[in-house]
Amino acid sequence: FETSWDTKLITDPRYTYQLVWTTYGHTARVWDCAFAPKSGMIASCAEDSTVRLWDAREEGTPVATLRGFNCLNAWCVDVDADEDIAVAGGNDGTAKVWN
């Protein structure tokens, strides 16, 4: 993938993607997500100030809802399933770590 100044995302024509499934659970706009390929874990964060964990091997089955922000938005998230750690940043200027 490449990005450009004119808001385009340029994809490599060798790769084609199909929607596999959609999962629901957040009560507001989703801002970020991360994928841990070894475990199949997906982490997402949203404007509802939660981080949610999903099992991609089970078509997005919910695993956990992580709370802890005292703000409106959780902006970014990453997950390391090998270490059982999820990290997220919120608009309150904090980073939260769960294990």
Image (cartoon, helix red, strand yellow):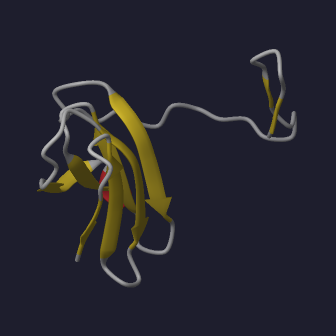
Q: Nearer the viewer, residue 49 or 27?
A: 49
Q: Nearer the viewer, residue 96 or 18?
A: 96
**Residue for point 38% across, 55% down:** 42
Q: How many marks?
A: 0
Does residue 38 appear to the left or right of 48 in the view shown? right
Query: Does 43 sit above or below residue 30?
Result: below
Q: Residue 26: image x %, image y %?
A: 20, 34
Q: Residue 40: image x %, image y %?
A: 41, 65
Q: Residue furthest bottom?
A: 83
Give the quadrant of residue 81: bottom left
Q: Nearer the viewer, residue 93 or 80?
A: 93
**Residue for point 41% across, 73% down:** 39
Q: Residue furthest top?
A: 6
Q: Residue 50: image x %, image y %?
A: 19, 45
Q: Residue 89: image x %, image y %?
A: 35, 52
**Residue for point 28% across, 54% down:** 54
Q: Nearer the viewer, residue 92 or 52?
A: 92
Position of the N terminus, as image quadrant, is top right
Does residue 69 appear to the left or right of 41 in the view shown? left
**Residue for point 73% across, 35% down:** 16
Position of the C terminus, as image quadrant, is bottom left
Does residue 17 appear to the left or right of 46 in the view shown? right
Query: Does 19 sit above or below residue 67?
Result: above
